[in-house]
C-alpha cells in the first residue's frame, strides 16, 4: 500500500467483540488492493481493542487502530477517523456487519470512470430474528440526480465518497454532529446536497444484520428527540438549492415514524406543527397526496396536548398503592395520578352524585367525577379493567378519544380528552339532564348514545383517528390506523381490556393477540372477534385443542425442523459470503 492510499475505510468500534472478526475479515479480504482500514475504538469495555490490535499486528501497513475516550455518540468516532484518513475516497461501515468482497472494487471503478462524487450500490438485509434475507436499496446502473440522492436515505455503509466532497461539507457546515445518535440522518443529506456527479451501481455492497428484535415497547424519549434534532439539522444545513428535497426526505421520515415509532406520537405532532408552514408550501410534499394528507391530519390536532394526568376511581374498593405505582410507571414518563374520592370530590354536588353515593354506585360515580376533571383540566381516565402495555403519549394531541368495547358499544373503562372538549361535556350532561330517566344508566351506553346520535358516528369496531374530530380506538385500544410493513404487524395498542375480575352476570370479553385470533378463526386478516360469555365453552374447547397440539412431540419436532431449515438457509448464504 502506498503512503497515500486510494481509499480510506473507516470503522468506528464500541463493544463489538462478538461480531468484529466477521467484519474485519470481510474488509481485509477485499479484492481491491490500495486501501487503508482506520479502526476507531470508542472506549470499548469488552475485548474489541485486543481484536483490533491483532489485525494491526498482522497487517501493519493496512490496519491502523486508534482509541478515543468513550463518547455516547458514534459521530465522535467517525469524525476522528475522518481526520486520520489519507485516501482520495472515504468508505464508512459498521463494526458488526459484512462488506461484500468486491465492494470497494465496484464502487471505485465507477467513481473513477464517471469522476463521481458519490457512488452507491444495494445491500442485503439479513434478519436473524426470522431468518430472512432481503435485497434493499437496489437502484439500477444509472446516473442519479442530487435530489434523488438525498431521497435514497441516510446510510454510510453502501456508499463511496470522494474525500474532497467530505472536506468541502466540513468546511461549509462543520463535522458530523456529535449530539445525536442519528448522525447519519443529520449529516448525509447535507453531504448529498453538495454532490454533483452521482452514480448508482447495480451491485451488492453490504450485508446489514439485524440480530435483536426491533421494538417500540419501551419508552425512551431520547430516541425520537435525537431523530427530530437530526432531521432539523439536515433541513437547516443542506445546500439551499436542494432544501425542498431535504424537507421531503424529513417529511417521509416523519410519516414512517408515526407508524414505526408511534409511541412517540406527541413528539412527532410537535415536530409537524413546528414545520408545517414549510411542509405545506413544499410542492414536492404537496404532490405526494398520501404523505401530505397524513401530515395534515396530525397538524390539525389540538394545539395543546392533554396533560400527563391519569384519573383513577378511589370510591369503594379503589386502587391499592401497588396499583397506583404501576400506573405511574407505565402511563407516562412523568405521570401525575389523581385518585378520585371523597377528599377531592363533592358527592353532594347534584342529584346524581347524591344518589350514586347513597346507592354505592361507585364505579359510575368515579367515572362522572373523572369526566368533570377531564373537562376542566384535561387528562385520561382508566379503571382496574385496563392493563397498560405502552405509555399513553401517542394519545395526548387528540381532542378526545374513546375505545370500542365491541362493535355495538363503547367502553366505560378508558377515555380521555383535552380541557374543554365538547364531547366530554355532552357526556357529562347525560348525568344531569332530566330526559335521561335512568339515573344509573351505564357509562358505556351514555358514551355510545352521544357519539352515535349527537355526532353521527356509524360504529364498526375499528380504529379511526381523524374522521370525527376525536379518535375512536379498536377494542384492543389500537392507536395506529395502518401496519408497519407486510411481515411485521407490530403492536399498535397502548393497553387492553381485562375482564378477569368482572361480575359473572355481566357480558365478558376475552382479549387475544391478533395472531392468536387469526389462527383460531382461520382468518388471514385477523379480523376482530367478539368473544361473549355464551361462546366461552366453545372457545375453551379450541384453546384446549391448541394446547394439546403444541404439547405433542410431533408438533415440537415440526417446529424444530422448521427452525433448523430456516437457519440452514441463512447459514448457507452466510457461508458463501465468508468463504467465496
Image (cartoon, helix red, strand yellow):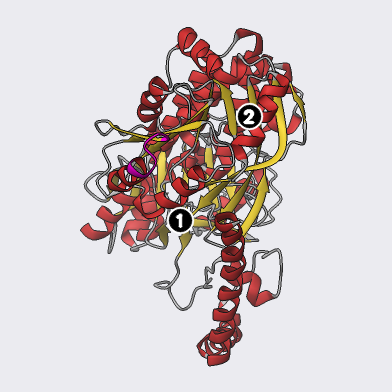
Residue 226: % across, % down: 42, 30
- Label 1: state its secondary structure: loop
| Disc number lying in front (1 or 2) | 2
* Image quarter of residue 288: top right
Q: Position of residue 32 (x, y in %)?
A: 58, 37
Residue 35's x, y, as percent?
50, 31
Cα separation between marks 1 and 2: 33 Å
Q: Nearer the viewer, residue 360 or 371?
A: 371
Residue 436 seen in the figure: no
- Image disc number at residue 92: none
The chief SS type of the magenta part is loop
Q: Which residues are magenta?
A: 57-62
Give the quadrant of the C terminus: bottom right
Judge from the rendering whether residue 78 lies leftward or rightward of residue 542; answer left or right.
left
- Front-lying residue, 520 or 73: 73
Task: Say what secondary structure mark 2 lies in.
Answer: helix
Q: Name, please, the residue furthest toward the front.
A: 2
Q: Residue at x 53, y 91 (%)?
A: 552
Task: Say if 187 sits above or below 449 in the image.
Answer: above
The residue at the point 55 percent across, 83 percent down is 543
Q: Residues within 10 Å of mark 2 (few under 14, many from 20)?
A: many
Q: Which mark is residue 108?
A: 2
The front one of 49 and 35 is 35
Mark 1 or mark 2: name the one nearer the start of the chain: 2
Above or below residue 260? Residue 356 is below
Q: Are marks 1 and 2 in contact (CB under 8 Å)?
A: no
Q: Is residue 416 visible?
A: yes
The total of numbered circles placed on residues is 2
Q: Which residue is mark 1?
A: 212
Amino acid at each position: 500500500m502506498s503512503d497515500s492510499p486510494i481509499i480510506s475505510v473507516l470503522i468506528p468500534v464500541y463493544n463489538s467483540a462478538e461480531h468484529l472478526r466477521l467484519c474485519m475479515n470481510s474488509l481485509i479480504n477485499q479484492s481491491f488492493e490500495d486501501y487503508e482500514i482506520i479502526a476507531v475504538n470508542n472506549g470499548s469495555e469488552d475485548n474489541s481493542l485486543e481484536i483490533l490490535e491483532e489485525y494491526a499486528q498482522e497487517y501493519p501497513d493496512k490496519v491502523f487502530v486508534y482509541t478515543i475516550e468513550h463518547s455516547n455518540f458514534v459521530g465522535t468516532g467517525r469524525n476522528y477517523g475522518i481526520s486520520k484518513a489519507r485516501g482520495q475516497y472515504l468508505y464508512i461501515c459498521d463494526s458488526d456487519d459484512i462488506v461484500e468482497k468486491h465492494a470497494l472494487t465496484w464502487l471505485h471503478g465507477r467513481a473513477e470512470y464517471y469522476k463521481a462524487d458519490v457512488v452507491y450500490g444495494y445491500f442485503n438485509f439479513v434478519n436473524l430474528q426470522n431468518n430472512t434475507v432481503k435485497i434493499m436499496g437496489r437502484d439500477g446502473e444509472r446516473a442519479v440526480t442530487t435530489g434523488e440522492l438525498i431521497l435514497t436515505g441516510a446510510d454510510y455503509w453502501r456508499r463511496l465518497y470522494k474525500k474532497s466532497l467530505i472536506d468541502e461539507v466540513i468546511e461549509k457546515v462543520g463535522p458530523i454532529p456529535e449530539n445525536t445518535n442519528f448522525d447519519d440522518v443529520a449529516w448525509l443529506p447535507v453531504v448529498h446536497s453538495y454532490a454533483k456527479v452521482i452514480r448508482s451501481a447495480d451491485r451488492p455492497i453490504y450485508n446489514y444484520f439485524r440480530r435483536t428484535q426491533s421494538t417500540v415497547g419501551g419508552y425512551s424519549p431520547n430516541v425520537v428527540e435525537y431523530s427530530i434534532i437530526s432531521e432539523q439539522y439536515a433541513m437547516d444545513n443542506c445546500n439551499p438549492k436542494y432544501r425542498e428535497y431535504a424537507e421531503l426526505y424529513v417529511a417521509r421520515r416523519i410519516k414512517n415514524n408515526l407508524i414505526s415509532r408511534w409511541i412517540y406520537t406527541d413528539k412527532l405532532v410537535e415536530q409537524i406543527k413546528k414545520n408545517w408552514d414549510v411542509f405545506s408550501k413544499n410542492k414536492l410534499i404537496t404532490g405526494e397526496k398520501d404523505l401530505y394528507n397524513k401530515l395534515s391530519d396530525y397538524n390539525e390536532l389540538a394545539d395543546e396536548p392533554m396533560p400527563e394526568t391519569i384519573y383513577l376511581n378511589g370510591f369503594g374498593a379503589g386502587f391499592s398503592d401497588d396499583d397506583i405505582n404501576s400506573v405511574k410507571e407505565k402511563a407516562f414518563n412523568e405521570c401525575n395520578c389523581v385518585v378520585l374520592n371523597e377528599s377531592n370530590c363533592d358527592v353532594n354536588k347534584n342529584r346524581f352524585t347524591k344518589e350514586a353515593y347513597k346507592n354505592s354506585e361507585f364505579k359510575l360515580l368515579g367515572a362522572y367525577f373523572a369526566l368533570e376533571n377531564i373537562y376542566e383540566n384535561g387528562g385520561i381516565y382508566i379503571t382496574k379493567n385496563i392493563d397498560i402495555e405502552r405509555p399513553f403519549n401517542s394519545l395526548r394531541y387528540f381532542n378526545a378519544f374513546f375505545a370500542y368495547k365491541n362493535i355495538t358499544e363503547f367502553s366505560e373503562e378508558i377515555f380521555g380528552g383535552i380541557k374543554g372538549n365538547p364531547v366530554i361535556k355532552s357526556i357529562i350532561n347525560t348525568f344531569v339532564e332530566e330526559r335521561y330517566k335512568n339515573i344509573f344508566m351505564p357509562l358505556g351506553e351514555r358514551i355510545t348514545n352521544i357519539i352515535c346520535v349527537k355526532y353521527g358516528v356509524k360504529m364498526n369496531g375499528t380504529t379511526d383517528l381523524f374522521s370525527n374530530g376525536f379518535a375512536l380506538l379498536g377494542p384492543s385500544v389500537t392507536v395506529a390506523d395502518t401496519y408497519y410493513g407486510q411481515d411485521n404487524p407490530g403492536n399498535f395498542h397502548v393497553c387492553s381490556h381485562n375482564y378477569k375480575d368482572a361480575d359473572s352476570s355481566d357480558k365478558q370479553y376475552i382479549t387475544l393477540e391478533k395472531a392468536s385470533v387469526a389462527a383460531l378463526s382461520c382468518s388471514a386478516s385477523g379480523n376482530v372477534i367478539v368473544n361473549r360469555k355464551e361462546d366461552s365453552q366453545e372457545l375453551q374447547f379450541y384453546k384446549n385443542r391448541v394446547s394439546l397440539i403444541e404439547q405433542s412431540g410431533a408438533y415440537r419436532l415440526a417446529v424444530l425442523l422448521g427452525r433448523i431449515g430456516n437457519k440452514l438457509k441463512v447459514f448457507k448464504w452466510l457461508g458463501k459470503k465468508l468463504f467465496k
